[in-house]
């Protein structure tokens, strides 16, 4: 690895690429020239001549009449520049979301004109009124015969908790939905189980039920088991459908009903301690049944409702459905398709969709009936007394060959993947196999893909957990073929992204929880808190150097939990199961005895801190009572802790070495539990009661 030249460093900074960073040890690490060049190439920068590329970069803004997008905060002063031929008149108006227009006032601010492409260009500055309403508006620039438009997004200063949950504290459960199965499930937890679990949780006084990302995966097996590596974050996974709850199921004939029952009975149920969930088998059976239900003639009212849904979802739904059908024929990775089909906008793709219109319709129909069932689950949660209801999880990215990367190809950077630099828990760094969004393309599109995604996930929800929310500030880009520690941070316009997130959450009446664990700049956490976005506090990670942070010093504006899905449940963690597992998988940097002793010493520090409070109950119950001593506004119980499970759901740094995301929820003995077992056991609710918030 070589050191970058001065011009390359300047070019990287001009593109928002950090040329050095502070690692988890507090040491400054310089980014290599090779990494900087690869990251810049991913943003279409000409690295062969960095001096000329930098000059062109500086001219880009001056070649525009308006910025691609302006994002402001309600009640705060802001300005917008406008470029015109020097000496020409300048007028700027705003068309509000409701169709009304307002003229903007030019402010007295001198900017030296600049020669651009042999034309002298001047810059005028206009004030954005502080009293503009929240929403998505349009700026119109006029200068003689020249015209231009740009998006103006006015975002809320504060999100916080919705009014119905603003009083007092809230608590809820976190569950991996696929792992929570009932007798009626097809081997995988589904929307009916979601509703039943929400009803049980609400009856105990819980305000929310946080579930894993329900994003859509591949249309045919093999399906990616990780809910954090979806094909799309815009649409949901029909694997979670309950076939029998679709309205048209009631109209099936006797023969088709018998076939559906036969398909359901043939799905593996993972009853034994060594059994794992089989998504592929479940989806094969469920898809065959869904094809039968799709063939049922819908009533005129249902047909109208379906048509309305398709029209409302627009081109995004049709493109997602088209990708799904092409994937059925050519494989789940669009990068391996015939060249003519790799471009979502090509004539070949349009012809394919027309030829396979019935199959495309089936995929769109799946999203409609899934939307109905998610709406019903949220309704059940609210009826059960939950002040928030279902809280969805938003993954940090998508599969590079999936639907989003295909239909929004120009929005994603090629030749790099998202990851994380080395930290105490992953000392080699992490590569997540996901393409990053390009900051410049998001701005050009007025953040429409991001806005659409957030609106979709919040449509039938009371909250959203944003995985790795620091990715809205900066992301670790790792060039293809490089190790995960050879990456670089790329900045994003966090004020714009957090603003759009806040606007969509406010309109949905939802809370936003940001997963802000790991290496995070304090100013990022401060910014999120200033906008009413909750952070995340995991008991084991709340440390100041080598000492636990006492509960009274924790953040108020956060969701506090004992554990997370990347750690074993508390019983397993307290026993050191994670260290022994990492040793078996060859992931420990040192000898087992030394690593286990160090880990148990850290955990014993926490146990001493908790036991000093003289809290009642067993150790796991004491840990949860300790959470309630903090000022955290939202508390969380992992459902695995509630039932005494101790098996790791996900082991970071592994793929097929461990059955990640395939473990059914189980009791202390490792034998899988059904939802009926959980809701029928009086002990399952003891950790929620430990908070004392009834």
Image (tube, rainbow, N blue to C red):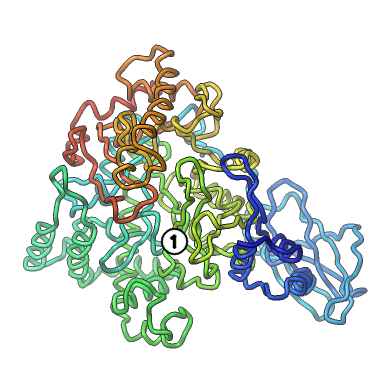
Front residue of 438/50: it is 50
Residue found at x 82% / y 60%: 126
User: Quick one: label 1, few (<14), some, or many (20+) residues within 10 Å?
Assistant: some
Of 154 and 218, which appears nearest the observer?
218
Quadrant in the picture for the N terminus: bottom right
Q: Which corner quadrant of the image does residue 239 belong to?
A: bottom left
Q: Which residue is drawn at 55% across and 28% down?
A: 544
- Decide if residue 2 is on the left or right side of residue 679: right
Residue furthest out toward the front: 591
Residue 334 in view here:
yes
Nearer-the-camera pick, 84 or 482: 482
Above or below 324: residue 261: above
Q: In which quarter of the image is the C terminus?
A: top left
Please tell me which residue lies in front, 20 or 681.
Answer: 20
Q: Is residue 570 left or right of residue 188?
A: right
In-image side of 528 versus 458 (left or right)? right
Name the residue rendered at 58%, 69% in the picture.
Answer: 42
Is residue 694 in sight in this rendering?
no
Relative to 253, is 428 above or below? above
Label 1, secondary structure: give it: strand
Provide residue 22's location: percent of width, then percent of height.
63, 45
User: Which residue lies under the disc numbered 1?
Assistant: 433
Above or below, 187 relative to 546:
below
Which residue is at 73% across, 71% downward?
50
Give x and y (percent) for residue 218. 32, 66
The spot of residue 95 in percent (x, y) is 69, 64
Residue 381 sits above or below residue 63 on the image: above
At which x and y percent is residue 604? 40, 22
**Number of numbered callouts drawn:** 1
């Amino acid at each position: 690895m070589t050191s970058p030249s001065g011009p390359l460093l300047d070019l990287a900074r001009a593109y928002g690429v950090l040329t050095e960073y502070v690692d988890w040890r507090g040491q400054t690490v310089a980014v290599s020239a090779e990494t900087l060049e690869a990251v810049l190439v991913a943003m279409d920068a000409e690295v062969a001549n960095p001096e000329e590329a930098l000059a062109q970069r500086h001219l880009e803004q001056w070649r525009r009449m308006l910025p691609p997008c302006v994002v402001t905060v309600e009640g705060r002063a802001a300005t917008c520049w406008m470029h015109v031929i020097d000496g020409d008149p300048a007028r700027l108006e705003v068309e509000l979301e409701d169709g009304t227009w307002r003229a903007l006032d030019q402010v007295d601010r001198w900017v030296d004109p600049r020669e651009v492409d042999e034309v002298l260009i001047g810059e005028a500055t206009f004030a954005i009124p502080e009293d503009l309403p929240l929403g998505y508006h349009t700026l119109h620039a006029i200068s003689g015969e020249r015209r231009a438009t740009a998006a103006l997004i006015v975002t809320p200063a504060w999100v916080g908790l919705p009014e119905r949950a603003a009083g007092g504290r809230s608590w809820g459960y976190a569950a991996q939905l696929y792992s929570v199965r009932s007798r009626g499930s097809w081997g995988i937890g589904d929307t009916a189980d979601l509703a039943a679990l929400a009803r049980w949780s609400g009856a105990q006084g819980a305000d929310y039920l946080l579930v894993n990302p329900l994003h859509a995966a591949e249309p045919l097996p093999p399906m990616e088991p990780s809910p954090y590596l979806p094909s799309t974050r815009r649409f949901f996974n029909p694997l979670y459908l309950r076939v029998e709850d679709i309205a048209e199921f009631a109209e099936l004939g006797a023969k088709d009903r018998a076939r559906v029952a036969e398909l359901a009975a043939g799905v593996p149920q993972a009853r034994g301690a060594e059994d794992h969930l089989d998504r592929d088998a479940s989806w094969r059976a469920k898809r065959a049944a869904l094809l039968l239900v799709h063939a049922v003639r819908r009533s005129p009212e249902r047909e109208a409702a379906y048509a309305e849904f398709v029209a409302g979802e627009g081109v995004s739904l049709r493109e997602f459905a088209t990708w799904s059908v092409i994937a059925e024929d050519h494989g789940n990775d669009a990068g391996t398709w015939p060249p003519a089909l790799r471009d979502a906008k090509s004539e070949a793709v349009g012809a394919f969709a027309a030829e396979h219109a019935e199959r495309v319709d089936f995929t769109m129909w799946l999203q409609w009936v899934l939307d109905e069932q998610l709406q019903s689950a949220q309704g059940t949660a609210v009826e059960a007394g939950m002040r928030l209801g279902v809280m969805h999880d938003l993954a940090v990215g998508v599969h590079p060959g999936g639907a989003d990367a295909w239909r929004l190809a120009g929005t994603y950077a090629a030749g790099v993947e998202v990851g994380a630099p080395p930290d105490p828990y992953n000392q080699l760094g992490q590569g997540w196999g996901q393409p990053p969004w390009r900051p410049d393309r998001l701005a050009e599109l007025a953040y429409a893909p991001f806005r659409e995604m957030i609106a979709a996930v919040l449509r039938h929800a009371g909250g959203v957990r944003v995985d790795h929310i620091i990715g809205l500030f900066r992301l670790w880009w790792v060039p293809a073929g490089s190790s995960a520690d050879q990456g670089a941070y790329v900045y994003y316009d966090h004020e714009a992204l957090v603003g759009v997130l806040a606007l969509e959450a406010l309109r949905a009446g939802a809370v936003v929880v940001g997963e802000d664990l790991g290496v995070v700049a304090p100013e990022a956490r401060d910014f999120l808190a200033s906008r009413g976005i909750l952070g995340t506090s995991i008991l084991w990670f709340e440390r100041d150097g080598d000492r636990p942070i006492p509960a009274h010093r924790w953040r108020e504006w956060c969701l506090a939990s004992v554990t997370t899905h990347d750690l074993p449940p508390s019983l397993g963690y307290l026993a050191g199961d994670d260290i022994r597992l990492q040793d078996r998988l060859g992931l420990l940097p040192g000898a087992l005895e030394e690593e286990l002793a160090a880990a148990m010493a850290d955990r014993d520090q926490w146990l001493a801190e908790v036991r000093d409070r003289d809290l009642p109950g067993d150790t796991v119950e004491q840990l949860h009572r300790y959470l309630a001593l903090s000022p955290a506004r939202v508390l969380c119980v992992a459902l695995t802790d509630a039932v005494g499970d101790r098996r790791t759901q996900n082991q970071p740094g592994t793929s097929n070495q461990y059955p990640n995301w395939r473990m059914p929820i189980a009791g202390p003995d490792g034998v899988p539990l059904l939802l009926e077992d959980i809701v029928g056991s009086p002990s399952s609710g003891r950790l929620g009661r430990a908070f004392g918030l009834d």
